[in-house]
Amino acid sequence: MRASVVGRDCSWLPFALFLVLAAGLWLEISFEHDSAARPTAPRCQPVPRRSIEPVFTNLTVEYNTAPAFTYDVIEGADVEGHDLANVRSNNVELLKQTCNALTECMGFNSNGWLKSKVSSRTPSGARLFVKLPLAAARQDSAAAHLGAGRAQVERLTHVLQPNINLTSLQEQALRQLRIFTYPVHLGSMPRAPDDYKYGVERRLPQVLASSPYAVQQPEEATHFLIPFQCTAHRYTVADRAGGQNAAEAGLASWIASISAAYPYWNRSAGANHFYVCSHDMGSSAVAQLSRAAQQNLIGLVNTADRRDGFFNVHRDLATAPHIGDGCDTCLQGGTRLSVTREAWAGTPRNRLAFMAGNLQRGPVRPRLRQFFDGDPDFLLVDGTLAAAHYRQALAESEFCLVVRGFRVWTPRLMDAVWSGCIPVIIADGYELPFSSLLHWPSFAVFVPEHDVPRLKDILLAKLSQAPLLRANLLAASQYLTYHSNWVPLDAFDILMLQLAARS
Ligand SMILES: *[C@@H]1O[C@H](CO)[C@@H](O)[C@H](O)[C@H]1NC(C)=O
Ligand SMILES: *[C@@H]1O[C@H](CO)[C@@H](O)[C@H](O)[C@H]1NC(C)=O
Ligand SMILES: *[C@@H]1O[C@H](CO)[C@@H](O)[C@H](O)[C@H]1NC(C)=O
């Protein structure tokens, strides 16, 4: 793993010493210790950076129908150079699958580097895995679906969209973005339900406060956060329509107070003001605002539905829904759930597709059931599983179905991402989080709703790409995960990069 350090104009700092300390600290705490508390960065301080290269660059991959390889393990050996790609994992199963799929791959070391040559070995603390042809092709259940042995050549795509340079976007955000959060006493703040699905609403203002984008003086601000919580207002009333009305009224009342107390709203008619709404209502929280406010106010929402009259893809931002990674209040069906990357390790993925949830909800899920209930390649659970079983099912499946209910988003998206289960998005019009920056087809599968009857064929055709989709998914997961403090290029930070890039 590499780390680099980028500073703002901090020439008055004892700069060199700090660089060394920050880089050392970063190496200590990156990736595996994502949730470790990190010191808050004051405004003018070097920013430790994750390496942001894509996993693979321009590799041609030839897939074998059945992975006809086995691996010799050589303890205490490595190969100098000849790096083909870095899978950023020490999960041996994942490394084997990825190396199987790459003809150029001759083996890999236990640190996650795939090698194009394994002959010039040097002593090392690592283990070297040397790829060997297997006389009798292993027929695991996934490979068995592939039928006759036709190889397929794929040019790999990047995790990021073409021409996106996150380093330069972040430099821009650090230079330009100044956010003032209106004081909470200005509005009504009912208590939000303790539900992991809506956690972004509470998490985002906290992380913002710990970030270098926060300013205390509103006159310094380029952007303004209205700390309104649509979900909290929604649940002040039992029925859905009443709750929606309460949330709309809550936002309208916030805006009345801030526009009376401060000059910034009136100056911009609400432009450069934003709010977070994780609830299904999404951007429709603005329904009781003036026309101008509806056009200008920016929503950071889970319900990012291009077909929704209130959601505007050029103004609003799709949030990575739910913050559950390692969070100890994550609830699924009333059971404590804490999906972590441990679920990536070990388990062979012998099942084609999995989904658990209310299979009667919305227009698509009942059809899923109609066509695939009882199919041995599918595990469709109508209802929730106990946390341990849920985790296991995520870890054992190649593809996890992320199917719309009434609205396009579902927390299953993140459960799949964190479990290394390739998300299959069946939700027409869903604007995936950060899709102006992340190239989702590199790590997810998209199936139009009307293609549900063909779902199995579509997934079987994708199966040969699964190791690479999964390797990319691991790389992408860092951008989709929230932390409790500011972490460069995590899900919170990517939202801020987008805000800065649009202003
Ligand atoms: C990757 O491929 C593109 C298009 O073929 C080419 O322009 C680019 O230079 C290649 N990059 C590398 C690192 O080989
Ligand atoms: C991305 O931007 C940074 C900072 O502006 C620059 O140093 C780097 O060369 C850029 N990377 C690419 C691949 O253009
Ligand atoms: C903003 O405009 C509203 C409505 O026109 C007005 O009532 C309010 O006093 C204005 N706010 C400020 C700070 O001038």
Image (spheres, rainbow, N blue to C red):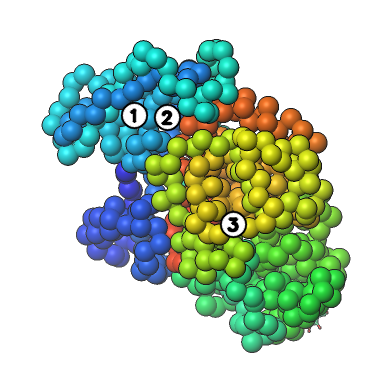
Of the image marks 3 and 2, the number of the one nearer the N terminus: 2
Residues under labels 3 and 2: Cα distance? 30 Å
**Mark 3 lies on residue:** 385
Figure quadrant of residue 503: bottom right
Of the image marks 2 and 1, the number of the one nearer the N terminus: 2
Residues under labels 3 and 1: Cα distance? 37 Å
Figure quadrant of residue 364: top right
Is residue 121 in view from this perspective? yes
Place of residue 102 in the rendered image (x, y in percent of width and height, measured from the top left): 42, 22
Place of residue 352 in the rendered image (x, y in percent of width and height, measured from the top left): 58, 35
Q: What amino acid type is highlighted by mark number 2?
A: Thr
Does dot 1 land on a helix, a strand or a loop? strand
Residue drawn at point x = 35 percent, y = 53 percent: 32
Is residue 314 in view from this perspective? no
Of the image marks 3 and 1, the number of the one nearer the N terminus: 1
**Mark 1 lies on residue:** 114
* 320 displayed left or right of 457: left
State the residue lying farthest toward the left.
Answer: 123
Residues under labels 2 and 1: Cα distance? 9 Å
Residue drawn at point x = 43 percent, y = 41 percent: 347
Q: What amino acid type is highlighted by mark number 3?
A: Leu
Q: Is mark 1 within 8 Å of ligand 1?
A: no
Q: Is mark 3 within 8 Å of ligand 1?
A: no
State the residue lying farthest toward the bottom.
Answer: 185
Q: Are marks 2 and 1 in contact (CB under 8 Å)?
A: yes
Mark 1: give few (<14), some (14-19) or many (20+) Cα within 10 Å: many
Question: In the image shown, does 435 or 500 lie closer to the viewer?
Answer: 435
Does dot 3 land on a helix, a strand or a loop? loop
